[in-house]
Image: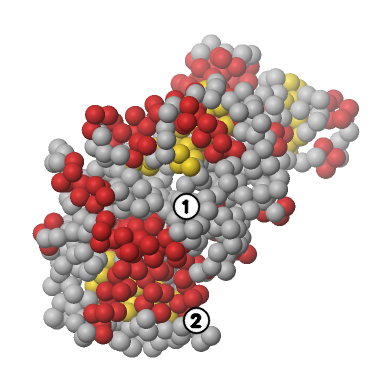
Amino acid sequence: MAEAAKFDLTDDSVVVIVGTGAGGGVLANELAQKGVKVVALEAGGRYLPEDYVNDEWDSFGQLAWTDPRTTSGDWRVAKDFSGLPAWIVKAVGGTSIHWAGASLRFQDHEWKALTNYGPVEGANLLDWPIDSAEMAPWYDLAEAKLGVTGTGDRPRLPGCNNYLVFEKGAKALGYQDVHSGNMAINSVEYDDRMACQQTGFCFQGCKWGAKWSSAYTDIPRGEATGNLEVRANAHAARILHDDSGKVTGVEYFDGDGNLQMQAARIVCVAGNSFESPRLLLNSASSMFPDGLANSSGQVGRNYMRHTTGSAYAIFDKPVRMWRGTTMAGIVRDEARHDPTRGFVGGYELETLSLGLPFMAAFLDPGAWGREFTTALDSYENMAGMWIVGEDMPQAENRVTLSDVTDKFGLRVANVNFTDHPNDIAMRNHAYEQGQAIYKAVGATRTLPTPPYPSTHNLGTNRMSERPEDGVVNKWGQSHDIPNLFVSDGSQFTTGAAENPTLTIVALAIRQADHIARELAAGNI
Amino acid sequence: MSNIRNLGLTRRALLSRTVAAGALAVVGTGFIAAPDAAWAVEVTAISEHEMATLLQMSRDIFPHDRVADRFYATAIKGYDSAEQKAAVAEGIAAVDAAAKAAGFDDYLSIGWEADRVAVLRGIEDMPFFQTVRGGLVTGLYNQKEVWPLFGYEGESYSQGGYIDRGFDDIEWL
């Protein structure tokens, strides 16, 4: 095994990747495996399974991105959690430490939302420049990398208490496509990672390593090639370019707060849907006064967060939903596109549990009194599910630069979001169905619960066929600047109904293949 | 929160030095305590009346009948500080003023929970109320000693998870 690489700041032969989550972390390893030299800049520190804390608030303090952000718009998060639009991670491995592991392929029709849904008033729908056939082999590779249950010959996870309640209710309602999910959580030992021990706390980092995260798979494997250097506590500030308009390097603040500049042959931005457009906008120059890669004016726009919400229910007997995997359970029947329900696109229903501290914080933020506390009194008898549906891209749902600055003096992201009427209709339908599932197994009380700070952050650098419609082409390559790529969920053209990580990983594997090929051909 | 022994008081001595402050607590010099002296909270920066009012407010904001007062007292003891003194004085004065406007002597003198809740509903947009409410979300529910009262078991990694300990043990379905 080679030593992890160490590259010179002036080495302009390297690919610089900003961010090390499901997008950046996978891209870094895939490039390193192909012999491409990579410097990955990560704003957060490095934490491994032995460091993870199975305590909700302590873990939040350890892993969450809590640097300042600002919010605006009609969404309730802007009122209840005005400085915390997202619950995502600042660490080597990014939000792949926090994610629940749900790994679903897009459905065929979702790649072509504009064609299949038709224009929707107020929405900025667009077809992806790629489709299911194009993505199928990359999904195969992503599922094998993540060890997704229910794909290949990998068995599904056993159902925990929360799932068993959910399954019985769903089947009583006539739902057919009900199972413990396609999860990047090992049901049996796989790829040097052990099987799930049904410990709970999937959101806090899997202490067994049974759930896939780039933090302890792709990152160390990439480092072992000798082609990857990961710099933790390196906060990207600005991407630089030359007079020809090609990017030349990334300025960042190191762990001591000193400004450094890493030269680059290619820059790949993978900081998530807030930080990636923030970095492009903060990199404005006299040549690119509106920010890099922004000739379309689309950088920051079309922010999507999935139509979410939760349904909890209370029963007359204990459920103990916290025991076992946090999200291993799904109903897929409502994921279809069926406008007779009063909205375009579809949604998934997935089991979800929170511990008592987070249930108190998220069940009904701002609520008090007995209506609230009697629900918590029955915490032991509670079951829960999460709604994940396709939300409409809207031009004004966007990330812009706030007047607030961070500790480095860099303007932070403001996140503006307002539900589209289609989002509201879908959420209300899902609340009805979710509550019906639990009533079918005897729920004595049901609790539709508002969306949490977002974990699925999509759009803001969207992929488009035509340069005027989006920021990057079908390879995630900037329409404007050939050696600048976007490698995270911000390149999503539309959000589909599925949890995004598998698609982010599949796109990263595909992008690595493309970049390596173009480098070898001397095209970049 | 201090154990009463730390105050150098026997229950009898403690009770002899107190006057009733609402239903929950008795007030003495430098402390408030349970009427049966099961717990006591020292106060140094804010007044005993202010601490007793905070305690009653906390119970009325997040009433859990099976959660003892001492957990609420733990959740609010941080208000007894020099930094919080002015904000607490102003906030409790506003709470008492709202109680007076509703025809009571002060907040602690309101005998029925429904009447106290009505007073709080009238001031719930006040920053002080929101600070107290928001602080309790973590101050109360993130006390590990409270979790078993709700059935919550906390971490299970140290015991090997639930794979052999009931992750799918539901029997009533």
Residue A280 point in image, percent of width and height = 25, 65
In the foreground, A108 or A283 = A108
Position of residue A447 in the picture relative to residue A472 (left or right): right
Q: Amino acid at mark 2?
A: Ala
Position of residue A291 in the picture relative to residue A490 (left or right): left
Please give the residue where the numbered disc 2 appears in the rendered image.
A224
- Helix, strand or loop at mark 2: helix
In the foreground, A369 or A31 = A31
Residue A207 point in image, percent of width and height = 61, 59
Subunit of mark 1? A
Residue A353 point in image, percent of width and height = 54, 41
In the foreground, A137 or A521 = A137
For the point 19% across and 82% down, the residue is A523
Please tell me which of labels 2 and 1 falls first in the chain.
1
Question: In the rendered image, which quarter contains the C terminus of chain B?
Answer: top right
| Viewer-nearest of discs 2 and 1 | 1
Residue A150, which numbered label? 1
Question: In the rendered image, which quarter contains the N terminus of chain B?
Answer: top right
Q: Amino acid at mark 1?
A: Gly
Q: CA distance from mark 2 to mark 1?
A: 30 Å
Determine if residue A235 is in view: no
